[in-house]
């Protein structure tokens, strides 16, 4: 009971810190977007550091390394233009709050999924810079690792964290500029999936399928809980993400065609569970329980935002389906 109270208290404090930045980003126009970007960039640096600090490199090397998240945030450069082709940049516009999901999906395609930068004339410059610098860093410190396997494990996890976490944070920032309802859905999907998985596992766990869902990664998960959470997650995706389309309300519209809806219903509940298992797998490789103790009772940032990160990424990709 004491641990439950601690977890609830920590969660409330965390959300009390994070939620105001979503409102500031959405309502305060350009100044709010600048503040929001600074917050999400700081979030991505902190979360990345909590993951990579276990890679056996010195603390100061990792502190300097985590500044590489700025590369992901800085590119593409033309995203920050005040005008594009003689018209005001909608994303940074001061004329109104929010962006339609159709326009936001086009920004996602350009900013997240390798649109051609008008300044550099390149598509994957950020990834290339990150790959080269992280690879050089690990080759310089090659002697710190006793085996090739240990080197590759720490190298790949570090590279993944420094690319994935700031990209996910950038997606969250863009969704929060687009509309608060978008953020609501992205956060609620993992909550619905996790909650129904817990109760489904408590009520039905191991009664139908004796083998655990992922015994080597998360021994407590059951197939029954996973199935129940998938069903309820799919129902929630349909109601929440297609509600606006059914009622012709743009504010509550995220998925705007049937192809997106079908993919989202099948993919998002599963991807929420995969996100949890993915970061649990990283912790298993590092032989740690949590990435840090920055959130008492919960662990580190990516202990709490593991499923959210995968759902946000998957949602942004689904929006590209025409």
Image (cartoon, rainbow, N blue to C red):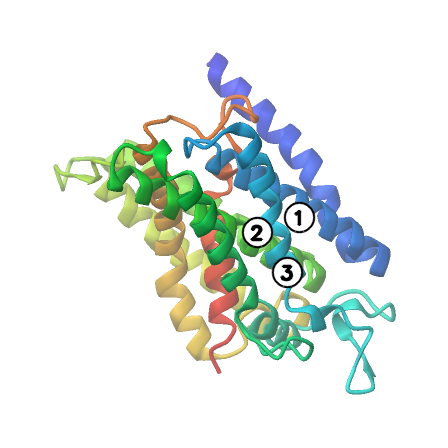
Pick the front one: 242 or 153: 153
How far from the left and from the top, in percent, is residue 35?
Answer: 79, 49
Few, some or many C-alpha atoms within 10 Å of disc 2 (few <14, some 14-19, many ≥20)? Answer: many
Residue behind mark 3: 175
Residue behind mark 1: 41
Q: Nearer the viewer, mark 3 or mark 2?
A: 2
Labels 3 and 1: the sequence-earlier one:
1
Q: Nearer the viewer, mark 3 or mark 1?
A: 1
Q: Are marks 1 and 2 in contact (CB under 8 Å)?
A: yes
Pick the front one: 35 or 67: 67
Label 1, label 2: how far apart the Cα atoms are: 7 Å
Question: Which of the 4 image quadrants contains residue 142?
Answer: top left
Please tell me the numbered disc located at residue 85: none
Labels 3 and 2: the sequence-earlier one:
2
How far from the left and from the top, in percent, is residue 305?
Answer: 51, 42
Question: Which of the 4 image quadrants contains residue 181?
Answer: bottom right
């Amino acid at each position: 009971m004491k641990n439950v109270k601690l977890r609830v208290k920590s969660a409330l404090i965390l959300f009390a810190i994070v939620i105001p930045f979503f409102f500031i980003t959405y309502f305060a126009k350009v100044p709010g977007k600048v503040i929001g970007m600074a917050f999400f960039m700081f979030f991505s640096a902190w979360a990345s550091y909590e993951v990579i600090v276990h890679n056996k490199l010195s603390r100061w090397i990792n502190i300097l390394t985590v500044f590489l998240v700025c590369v992901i945030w800085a590119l593409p450069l033309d995203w920050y233009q005040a005008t594009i082709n003689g018209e005001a940049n909608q994303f940074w516009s001061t004329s109104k709050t929010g962006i339609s999901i159709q326009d936001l999906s086009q920004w996602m395609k350009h900013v997240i999924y390798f649109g051609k930068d008008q300044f550099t004339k390149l598509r994957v410059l950020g990834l290339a810079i990150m790959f080269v610098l992280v690879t050089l860093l690990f080759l310089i410190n090659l002697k710190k690792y006793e085996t090739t396997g240990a080197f590759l494990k720490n190298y790949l996890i570090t590279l993944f964290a420094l690319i994935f976490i700031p990209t996910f944070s950038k997606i969250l920032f863009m969704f929060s500029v687009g509309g608060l309802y978008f953020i609501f859905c992205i956060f609620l999907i993992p909550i619905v999936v996790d909650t129904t998985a817990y109760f489904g596992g408590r009520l039905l766990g191991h009664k139908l399928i004796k083998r655990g869902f992922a015994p080597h990664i998360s021994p407590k998960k059951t197939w029954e809980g996973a199935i129940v959470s998938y069903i309820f997650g799919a129902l929630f995706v349909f109601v929440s993400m297609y509600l606006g389309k059914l009622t012709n309300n743009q504010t509550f519209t995220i998925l705007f065609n049937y192809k997106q809806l079908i993919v989202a219903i099948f993919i998002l509940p599963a991807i929420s569970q995969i996100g949890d298992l993915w970061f649990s797998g990283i912790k298993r490789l590092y032989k740690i329980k949590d990435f840090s103790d920055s959130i008492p009772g919960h662990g580190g940032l990516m202990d709490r935002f593991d499923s959210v990160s995968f759902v946000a990424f998957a949602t942004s990709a689904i929006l590209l389906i025409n």
